[in-house]
Amino acid sequence: MQFLNASDVSKITGVGTGRASAIIQEINKDLREQGYRTIKGRVSKNAFEKAYGEVKK
């Protein structure tokens, strides 16, 4: 499973790393509410793509 950090999310979305961290926190909060375990400061690529669309390389 591939994980993204704030730097990765920042590059993908074009926002600053502070906003990228907030995005990760929002996604992780939703995942925890669904019963999943999360890693602080990281988000799975699959969860990010479900929330924001497919990541193009």
Image (tube, rainbow, N blue to C red):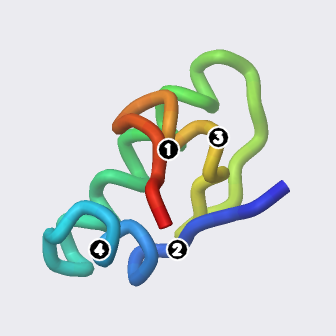
Give, as a three-letter code, the residue at label 2: Asn
Q: In the rendered structure, which disc, 4 or 1, sits on the residue that comes first in sequence? A: 4
Which residue is at a point 77% across and 40% down the rendered structure image? 37
Q: Residue beneath label 1, please?
A: 48
In 3D space, how far apart are the residues under numbered discs 4 and 1 (Cα atoms)?
Answer: 12 Å
Residue extending furthest toward the front: 57
Residue extending furthest toward the top: 34
The location of residue 40, given as percent across then percent down, is: 60, 64
Give, as a three-letter code, the residue at label 3: Asn
Q: Residue beneath label 3, please?
A: 46
> Is residue 9 depicted above or below 31 in this figure?
below
Residue 18 badge: none
Residue 5 badge: 2
The location of residue 53, given as percent across then percent down, is: 39, 35
In 3D space, how far apart are the residues under numbered discs 4 and 3 (Cα atoms)?
Answer: 16 Å
Q: Nearer the viewer, residue 50 or 25?
A: 50
Q: Residue beneath label 4, please?
A: 10
Direction from residue 38 to residue 1 in the image, left or right: right
Give, as a three-letter code, the residue at label 4: Ser
The location of residue 34, given as percent across then percent down, is: 65, 16
Q: Nearer the viewer, mark 3 or mark 2?
A: 3
Q: Nearer the viewer, residue 15 or 40?
A: 15
Which residue is at a point 47% across and 41% down the rendered structure image? 54
Q: Nearer the viewer, residue 6 or 36?
A: 6
Which residue is at a point 50% across and 39% down the rendered structure image? 49
Near mark 1 (Cα within 10 A), the count class, few <14, some 14-19 or many ≥20, is some
